[in-house]
Image (spheres, rainbow, N blue to C red):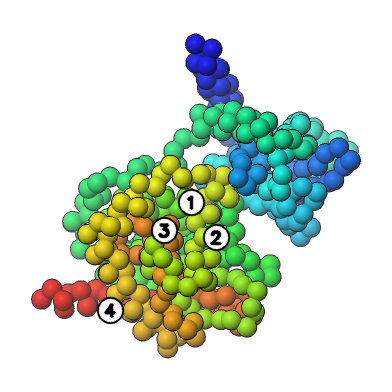
């Protein structure tokens, strides 16, 4: 009964917090105008300068050690020196829109850190409202205990971000003769993806995805669904759920990589495999699949389809169709941009694991290469990319029709 009482107390606190947040009067979205981190003898102080007073919720996540600050949806207007760096045991931080209505700051640490105090300072002198979080070293057991309690409260507060995918196609799907293409701009919100100088992968691939969506819609043959159409974080499994709920005929995820070898450039396309085609592909897939954990969601309990479906006949057919689409992508894009050696590769990307939707992940180029980066910033080049990918989609469906005549 004592355990039940503690659980009920946790949810009661969460309900009170939720009521407080919901009761706030409607007003313009506040902003975070600066972010400062200071190393003191006894603590690391993390300060967010705010345009207005806001509510906040802090919780901790292990493996790797993170302190997460959830805010109402805010704009981040930070100076250059607000960028992530190492400060004491803090190894870096990231921020952005986590989902509609919620912005998130994730602080990474090399060792367990406890929240000694957190509070809002009122305006004083030239300073406005400030959110202050003081972090101090702690041991792993204490960190885990605090994490369990804070996550329980956060789960009680947070509503699901997307409905579970239904087994049946979306209502009215058969009334629309157009093929459904789901375009998935990688990363977003609190997860910036790869970095190239001051450029974020999430922004570059979103621009490319919007161009491709317009090109496909203009044909009149395709209905395009975007997993995200703005700078917002979308969980990997939710990207799959969006595709399945939309009754997708194809799923195309767009990314751009960044590596130490700045001379390497070119496009590549990935399809699903339990065994990566090379060490490079395996490392890339591992880093992409960690996105949900980095952003504060552990999906380890959501994986029954990963092992079972891969040996199912339906999944095998889907993998074959995905490989066919990849072949068309390689064929069409060879006239648009340089390709990597062995441009069709295989890796265990989580977003390619829909059991019934042919899926490819296209790496558009390398942000670490100045030529690729310049091209991906160019609207005319993105038009060429969209033209090539649209031709690949056309070729795929024309080939399917010919095969079944």
Quadrant housing residue 203: bottom right
N-terminal of the two: label 3 or label 2? 2
Q: CA distance from mark 3 to mark 1?
A: 11 Å
User: Nearer the observer, disc 4 or disc 2?
Assistant: 2
N-terminal of the two: label 4 or label 2? 2
Compared to 18, does 182 lie above or below?
A: below
Does dot 2 land on a helix, a strand or a loop? helix
Q: Nearer the viewer, residue 126 or 273?
A: 273
Does dot 3 land on a helix, a strand or a loop? helix
Q: Residues within 10 Å of mark 1 (few under 14, many from 20)?
A: many
Report which residue position mark 1 lands on. 234
Q: CA distance from mark 4 to mark 3?
A: 23 Å
Q: CA distance from mark 2 to mark 1?
A: 16 Å
N-terminal of the two: label 2 or label 1? 1
Seen at 44% across and 81% down, the residue is 342
User: Nearer the observer, disc 4 or disc 3?
Assistant: 3
N-terminal of the two: label 1 or label 4? 1
Report which residue position mark 2 lands on. 287
Report which residue position mark 4 lands on. 395
Q: Is residue 251 left or right of residue 51?
A: left
Report which residue position mark 3 lands on. 351
Seen at 63% across and 66% down, the residue is 195
């Amino acid at each position: 009964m004592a355990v039940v009482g503690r659980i009920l107390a946790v949810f009661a606190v969460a309900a009170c917090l939720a009521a407080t947040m919901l009761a706030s009067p409607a007003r313009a979205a506040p902003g975070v105008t600066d972010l400062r981190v200071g190393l003191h003898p006894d603590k690391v102080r993390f300060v967010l300068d705010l345009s207005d007073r806001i509510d906040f919720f802090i919780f901790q996540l292990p493996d790797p050690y993170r302190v997460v600050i959830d805010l109402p949806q805010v704009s981040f207007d930070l100076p250059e020196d607000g960028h992530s760096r190492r400060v004491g045991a803090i190894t870096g931080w990231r921020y952005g829109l986590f989902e509609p209505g919620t912005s998130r700051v994730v602080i990474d640490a090399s060792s367990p850190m406890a929240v000694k105090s957190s509070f809002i300072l009122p305006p004083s002198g030239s300073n406005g409202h400030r959110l202050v979080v003081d972090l101090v070293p702690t041991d792993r057991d204490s960190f885990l205990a605090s994490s369990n309690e804070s996550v329980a409260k956060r789960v009680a507060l947070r509503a699901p971000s997307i409905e579970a995918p239904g087994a049946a196609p979306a209502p009215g799907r058969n009334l629309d003769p157009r093929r459904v293409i789901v375009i998935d701009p990688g990363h977003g919100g609190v997860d910036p993806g790869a970095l190239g100088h001051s450029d974020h992968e999430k922004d570059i691939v979103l621009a490319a995805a919007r161009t491709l969506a317009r090109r496909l819609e203009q044909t009149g043959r395709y209905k395009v669904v975007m997993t995200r159409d703005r700078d917002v974080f979308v969980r990997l499994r939710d990207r799959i759920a969006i595709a399945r709920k939309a009754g997708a005929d194809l799923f195309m995820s767009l990314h751009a990589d960044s590596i130490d070898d700045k001379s390497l450039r070119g496009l590549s396309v990935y399809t699903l495999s339990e065994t990566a085609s090379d060490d490079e592909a395996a490392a890339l897939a591992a880093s992409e699949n960690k996105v949900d954990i980095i952003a504060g969601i552990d999906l380890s309990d959501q994986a029954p389809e990963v092992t079972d479906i891969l040996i199912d006949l339906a999944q095998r057919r889907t993998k074959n169709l995905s490989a066919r689409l990849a072949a068309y992508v390689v064929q069409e894009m060879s006239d648009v941009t340089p390709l990597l050696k062995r441009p069709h590769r295989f890796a265990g990307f989580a977003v390619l694991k829909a059991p019934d939707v042919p899926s490819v992940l296209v790496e558009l180029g390398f942000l670490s290469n100045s030529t690729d980066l310049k091209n991906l910033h160019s609207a005319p080049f993105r038009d060429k990319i969209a033209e090539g990918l649209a031709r690949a989609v056309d070729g795929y469906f024309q080939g399917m029709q010919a095969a079944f005549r």
